[in-house]
Amino acid sequence: MAKITYESICEKLGFDVDTYVPPEGDTEDVNGESPFRKLSLEELTFLTDRIEAKAV
């Protein structure tokens, strides 16, 4: 398995996670599937750990 990196996750999602703004409002489908569902459990854990480390 390839090493999980922030860059590889952003590439997989097609956007920069740090600047991602979820859609809201009447013109966008806010009930659509989250793009983060594409990620594996390991990738989600990586992002969670990264967010927690930045919050300290």
Image (cartoon, helix red, strand yellow):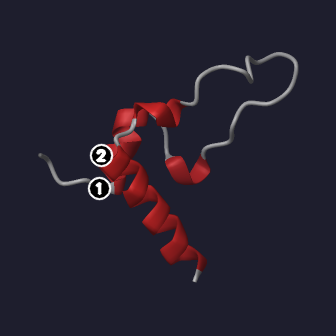
Three-letter code for the amino acid on which mark 1 is drawn: Thr
Q: Secondary structure at mark 2?
A: helix
State the residue at coordinates (53%, 66%): 51
Q: Mark 1 = which residue?
A: 5
- 23 or 52, nearer to the observer: 52
Q: Looking at this rendering, what residue extends furthest in the bottom direction?
A: 56
Whether 56 is drawn above or below 43: the answer is below
Q: Are marks 2 and 1 in contact (CB under 8 Å)?
A: yes
Task: Quote the CA–CA distance across marks 2 and 1.
Answer: 5 Å
Q: Mark 2 = which residue?
A: 8
State the residue at coordinates (35%, 35%): 12
Q: Position of residue 35 (x, y in %)?
A: 52, 31
Quadrant in the rendering for residue 30:
top right
Whether 23 is drawn above or below 9: the answer is above
State the residue at coordinates (44%, 57%): 47
- Label 2 Cα crowd, 10 Å radius (few <14 / some 14-19 / many 20+): few
- Label 1 Cα crowd, 10 Å radius (few <14 / some 14-19 / many 20+): few
Three-letter code for the amino acid on which mark 2 is drawn: Ser
Placement of the C terminus among the 4 image quadrants: bottom right
Q: Looking at this rendering, what residue extends furthest in the front direction?
A: 41
Q: Position of residue 19 (x, y in %)?
A: 60, 49
Q: Secondary structure at mark 1?
A: loop
